[in-house]
């Protein structure tokens, strides 16, 4: 079977995509695209593909494309690629507005192309195992979750990600969406949400640089999510705590292990003390393989547009609550 011809647009976040396509058995990385021609040329030489600064010029030479560009460009670029009949793997978020997000979703459905959101966290082996633990109630049913995403970005006043109009909001929308999506995937659809945010400590941002959010899910569980780009020094207790009546399930801050604390003590159920899957190169390879598999077999991605929209809607509801 012929390999799927792919291109990656945007070589900051998209660099992981490029390495993943290069490593994936079902793909041929044909093109890398970046406005920085020197960077594009360097990556193309390393990966043995072609490069350009204009992605529209190579649209007829590919079957699928990863769009890893600033958020305010997602709608126009996705719609153009979909109209050309290309399968699209789009870095989060869908778009900066619900209206544009729905336009992308409808266009992909009408064109019968595979459209997938790059919610990379969901596809990691450790997160797949965590999903099994929660779904199968191996240690009881989760009723409460706490998630800490403590990060730091060097101040970048005037950049596209400093402005609400081009970022789509603040840190919660740009980065926290991964973990809002994860919580929804683990605990069910979000039925109520609220947040408070501040740009104190990240005054270079128009939107919030730190957010505290609360969510309630259809399962009855509740969650608290801390997200920040202003925490230069941090020591979070974990990435995620999940409480059941009989146990505490802990996803480590580096997503390297899952531990359980219960009446039998503390033990590792996935991670260094258990058996980790063989290293596949980059974390993006797991999601890229799923994307390619959906193209080959005509399947709907787990993180298609409509599924991914749930996390966006929860965040928009949070913003309207403040």
Image (cartoon, grey):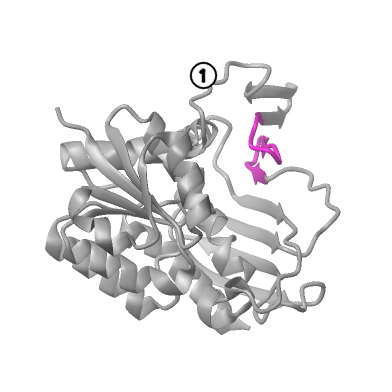
Indicate left or right for 117 with 174 as reference: left
Q: Is residue 166 above or below residue 273?
A: below
Q: Closest to the observer: 39 or 116?
A: 39
- Residue 86 seen in the figure: yes
Indicate left or right for 231 with 143 as reference: right
Query: How far from the left and from the top, in percent, is residue 126?
Result: 54, 32
User: Is residue 123 found inside the magenta-colored segment of the image?
Assistant: no
Q: Residue, x 83% and y 57% (percent of image)?
A: 232
- Residue 120 seen in the figure: no
Q: Residue, x 67% and y 20% (percent of image)?
A: 272
Q: Which residues are magenta?
A: 240-258
Query: How far from the left and from the top, in percent, is residue 292?
Result: 28, 39
Secondary structure at badge 1 equals loop
Query: How far from the left and from the top, in percent, is residue 46?
Result: 48, 35
Q: Residue, x 77% and y 78% (percent of image)?
A: 203
> What is the quadrant of residue 33 in the picture?
bottom left
> Which residue bears the numbered disc 1?
278
Q: Is residue 54 above or below residue 287?
A: below
């Amino acid at each position: 079977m012929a390999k799927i011809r792919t291109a990656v647009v945007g070589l900051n976040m998209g660099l992981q995509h490029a390495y993943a396509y290069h490593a994936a058995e079902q793909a041929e990385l044909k093109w890398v695209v970046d406005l920085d021609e020197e960077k594009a040329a360097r990556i193309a030489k390393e990966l043995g593909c072609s490069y350009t600064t204009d992605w529209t010029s190579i649209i007829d030479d590919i079957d699928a494309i990863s769009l890893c560009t600033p958020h305010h460009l997602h709608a126009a670029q996705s719609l153009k690629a979909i109209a050309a009949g290309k399968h699209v793997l789009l870095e989060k978020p869908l778009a900066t507005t619900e209206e544009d997000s729905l336009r992308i979703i409808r266009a992909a459905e009408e064109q019968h192309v595979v459209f997938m959101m790059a919610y990379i966290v969901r596809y990691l082996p450790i997160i797949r195992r965590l999903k099994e633990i929660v779904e199968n109630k191996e240690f009881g049913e989760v009723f409460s979750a706490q998630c800490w995403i403590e990060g730091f970005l060097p101040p970048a006043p005037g950049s596209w990600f400093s402005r609400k109009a081009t970022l789509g909001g603040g840190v919660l929308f740009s980065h926290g969406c991964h973990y809002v999506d994860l919580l929804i995937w683990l605990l069910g659809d979000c039925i109520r949400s609220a947040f408070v945010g501040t740009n104190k400590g990240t005054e270079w941002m128009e939107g919030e640089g730190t957010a505290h959010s609360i969510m309630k899910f259809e399962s009855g569980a509740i969650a608290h999510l801390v997200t920040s780009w202003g925490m230069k020094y941090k020591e979070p207790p974990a990435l995620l705590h999940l409480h059941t009546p009989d146990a505490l399930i802990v996803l480590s801050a580096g997503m390297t292990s899952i531990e359980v604390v219960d009446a039998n003590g503390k033990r590792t159920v996935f991670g260094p003390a258990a058996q980790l899957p063989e290293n596949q190169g980059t974390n993006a390879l797991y999601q890229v393989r799923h994307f390619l598999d959906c193209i080959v077999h005509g399947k709907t991605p787990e993180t298609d547009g409509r599924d991914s929209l749930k996390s966006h809607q929860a965040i928009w509801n949070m913003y309207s609550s403040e």
